[in-house]
Image: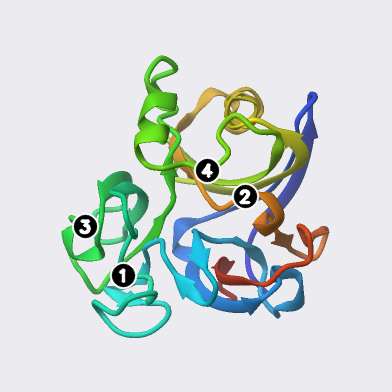
Amino acid sequence: MASYTYGNVSTGTNLHFIKTSPNNIVLKTAGKNVVKTEEYGVNGGFFYLKDQISIAVNNDVPVRGVVGGYGSGWFNEKYARGTLVWDAAAGKYSVQIVPTASEIEVIDRSRYWAQGGISMTLQDDTTWKTLAKLQGMPNIDGKTTRTALVWNSGLNIWLIVTDTLCTAEQFRLAIKKNIGSGTLVDGIFLDGGGSSQLRCKEKVIDGDGRSVVQMVAISAK
């Protein structure tokens, strides 16, 4: 089975998380609700109907379709958006604000994954919201369920879903206060609302029951 730790913390905003190694992450198509798949993980980036409109690539291969194809996961459609990149050759993460996977900078294009979303900018509490708005974050001030990926200085990654209706600011603050014991470096918001879904042995969250196009899964290797 996949190697991970599940946890739940609530201080007004309830956070469910899966903590694992970046080397256990694989981006996959879903085509159904995350809880109805056979994978452990959370929902991924933004989509429209059956098209993936956030970057989602493993080793330069988009999760759905072909390189350069619309809806394949090769593009952050309409916006250059915060994209979480794990560069396995370098052993480091980054958030790169790019419109297309071809602009992602890594050492070895056969050894990385990249998940598009919206920059959380965890080290800058004054400009994060402006940057998120520039990246087209939907419903930033509305109260809804939300999903995020964050990492820390120890290179752990957390896949986080809240089932509390909250603003982006409340979600971000809860993560900063309750995840990583002060070691968090940065992260991204993923799709939220009814798309916020999580599946592992200990917990399932199905959002509003809808299907999602793509998910962040934990491999069983």
Which element type, helix, strand or loop, lies under badge 2? Answer: loop
Residue type for callout 4: Pro
User: Which is nearer the N-term, disc 4 or disc 2?
Assistant: 4
Q: Would you name the residue on which mark 2 appears?
A: 192
Q: Looking at the image, do the residues carrying marks 2 and 1 touch, with CB atoms under 8 Å apart?
A: no
Q: Looking at the image, do the residues carrying marks 4 and 2 touch, with CB atoms under 8 Å apart?
A: yes
**Distance between mark 1 and mark 4 Cα atoms:** 21 Å
Q: Would you name the residue on which mark 4 appears?
A: 138
Q: Looking at the image, do the residues carrying marks 3 and 4 touch, with CB atoms under 8 Å apart?
A: no
User: Which is nearer the N-term, disc 2 or disc 1?
Assistant: 1
Q: Nearer the viewer, residue 121 or 59?
A: 121
The image's mark for residue 104 is 3
Q: Residue at x 80, y 25 (%)?
A: 12
**Distance between mark 2 and mark 3 Cα atoms:** 24 Å
User: Comparing marks 4 and 2, which lies closer to the viewer?
Assistant: 4
Q: Would you name the residue on which mark 1 appears?
A: 74
Q: Position of residue 94 (x, y in %)?
A: 31, 45
Asked if 48 appears above or below 172 in the picture, the reply is below
Asked if 139 appears above or below 33 in the picture, the reply is above
Q: Looking at the image, do the residues carrying marks 1 and 4 touch, with CB atoms under 8 Å apart?
A: no
Q: Position of residue 16 (x, y in %)?
A: 74, 45
